Amino acid sequence: MISDPTFYVAAVIGVVFLGLAKGGFSGVGIIATPLIALTVPPVRAAAIVLPILLVQDVISVWVYRRDWDAWNIKVLLPGAVLGIGAGWALAAYVSEAYVRLALGLVVCAFVLNVWVGAANKAVARPSALSGVFMGVLSGFTSMISHAGAPPFQMHVLPQRLDRVRFAATAAVFFAVVNAIKVVPYLLLGQFSTENLATSAVLFPFAILTNVLGIWLVRVTPHKWFYRITYFLVFLISLELIRGGVTGIFG
């Protein structure tokens, strides 16, 4: 088990964001892995985060088990499986920094487009093909750096689902994605007794912040939920761009 106090300061803050994300504010958890990677190698940070995500997934899926949107899950998951497979196959060759930079730029453009043209955009369900494509991107970026939320949000946010339905759909989708990722992570040799023990120490914080996130989704008005979520997605896109640029030129 890791004993460095600096690691645990970063890890606890990261787990707080993971809990809020798993509670329903999907996306803010993307900050966790880069934050923990300030104190340990990025691959190890990702391996420590995954068991925490799995514990939080159990809680979120149980709470939201009756509220998820079946159509979105059906179109996103097949693509996600392909994306995870591609991420596993290309893990040794793909630059995480370039992936983060490209994803950040696309997501930033998406949010700015929504804000600029929001008054003229009607609520509409995207095509199934679009859902499969976003599923591929989500699975791939999730496998590479636990950054699968932005493509998911680009597909689901414009549909303006009820806030609980949105949170439930995210919970179910990423629970399946994270469960599938266990096998590739094992094959890549990213789990160890020390990493798993470190994850276990962080489980209480993960559970408490997950419950907090679920409560916040329940009490936040629908309009403000989407305003906050879009704003958080915009901040996440900036963090992705910053991390990508730093990784490439830093």
Image: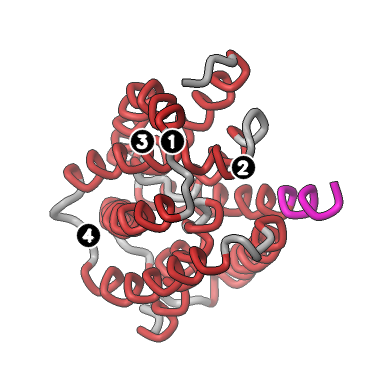
In the displayed structure image, the side of residue 207 where residue 247 appears, left or right: right
Residue denoted by label 2: 42
Query: Cβ–Cβ below 8 Å for labels 3 and 4?
Result: no
Counting from the top left corner in percent of width and height, residue 116 is at 64, 68
Q: Real-space Cα distance between discs 1 and 2?
A: 15 Å
Counting from the top left corner in percent of width and height, residue 71 is at 25, 74
Residue denoted by label 4: 68
Dot 3: what SS?
A: helix
Residue denoted by label 3: 213
Q: Earlier in the sequence, mark 4 or mark 2?
A: 2
Q: Earlier in the sequence, mark 3 or mark 1?
A: 1
Residue positioned most to the left: 66
Mark carried by residue 192: 1
Task: Judge whether 128 appears above or below 187 on screen.
Answer: below
**Mark 2 belongs to which amino acid?**
Pro
Q: Residues within 10 Å of mark 2 (few under 14, many from 20)?
A: some
Q: Residues within 10 Å of mark 1 (few under 14, many from 20)?
A: some
What residue is at 60 percent from the left and 63 percent from the top? 111
Q: Residues within 10 Å of mark 3 (few under 14, many from 20)?
A: many
Dot 1: what SS?
A: loop
What residue is at 71 percent from the left and 48 percent from the top? 243
**Mark 1 belongs to which amino acid?**
Ser
**Which segment is the magenta one?**
242-250
**Would you say residue 23 sits in the magenta stretch?**
no
